[in-house]
Image: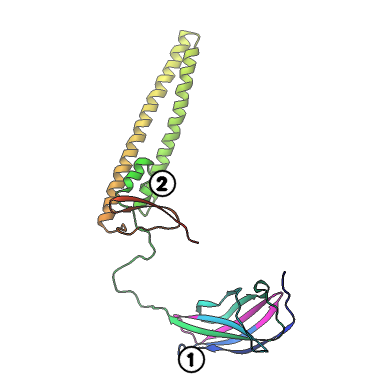
Amino acid sequence: MRLKIVAFTLFVISSGSLTGQTSAQITDVDFYLVNNSIVVNYSITGAFVNELYEIDLHFVTETGQTIIPVSVRGDTGPNISGGSNKTIYWDIDNDRLEISGVLKALVTIVSSRVINSEPYTGSPQIRGEKPLGGPGYAFLSFVVPTLGGYFVEKNKARAIITTATELTLGIHLSNLSGKIKQYETDLDNASSQTERNEINDKLTTAEDNYYMSIVTFGLIWVADIIWVAIKGSQNLKQGKTKRGQNYYGEGLNLNYNGDQLCVGYKITF
């Protein structure tokens, strides 16, 4: 059953920050009721450019009971920057509360932290970047043509072009195979030697094209396996792979760990 909100008075009693942590202050607090939600507006004055704050909002009834909102969104919680026109939305209806009388609000800076704006002078790092694959991914290209190339290089253009080429050749081979079967059937049903010779010429041409295409497909396949092995070995020597520790993102993952190809699946609840 949905609880109704009984009429009440909104009253700002205090706002501020924890003493000694920051010179910033909460000012210009104002809030009002919209349908079954309370909208709180406030400003953070005296803030530094590189300072972030954790903002807390709670309410006090006329009997002294403290109400901590749960269904809140907007400029509340950690990592709130300074400035004006901050807004918090509290969905009272979703919290299933029945409130009456005088409601008092308190907007507070719980803590603050300064973002380091100085450049990092230590060893260069790329945070959050997925490591590249090692030579073991050549086996992946052996199993599925061109697939290993997507793991050994950050730029996927070469792998995409190789895949498109192999796919085009595969479709072409399939069409030629169909034509060859049709020509063989037509040859068996030919009623004259002239018709038989004509079909036989078409069959010979189709077979030649088929063999040339399959050789081309195979050469590209082998070349891709060799390239993935070489590129993966370079990644391993240059420290671009993550040895001794598997990197797994969400979903199905393939990784080269030392001399093993690792398969894993990750899902976060």
Spot occupied by residue 247 in the image (x, y as percentages of width and height): 37, 58
- Badge 2 vs badge 1, beta-carbon distance below 8 Å: no
**3D distance between C-alphas at marks 2 and 1:** 58 Å
The one of 244 and 199 positioned closer to us in this rendering: 244
Which residue does the numbered mark 2 point to in the structure image? 160
**Image position of 194 (left or right of 107):** left
On residue 227, which mark appears? none
Spot occupied by residue 39 in the image (x, y as percentages of width and height): 65, 78
Q: Which residues are magenta?
A: 31-53
Q: Quadrant of residue 75?
A: bottom right
Please tell me whether residue 115 belongs to the stretch shown in magenta.
Answer: no
Picture quarter with the N terminus: bottom right
Please name the amino acid that badge 1 sits on: Thr
* Residue in the image at 36% along x and 27% along y: 211
The one of 7 and 46 positioned closer to us in this rendering: 7
* Residue in the image at 31% along x and 48% along y: 136
Image height of 92 relative to 168, above or below: below
Q: Quadrant of residue 62?
A: bottom right
| Of callouts 2 and 1, the N-terminal one | 1
Q: Dot 2: what SS? A: helix
**Image position of 256 (left or right of 104):** left
The one of 64 and 137 positioned closer to us in this rendering: 64
* Residue in the image at 50% along x and 84% along y: 110
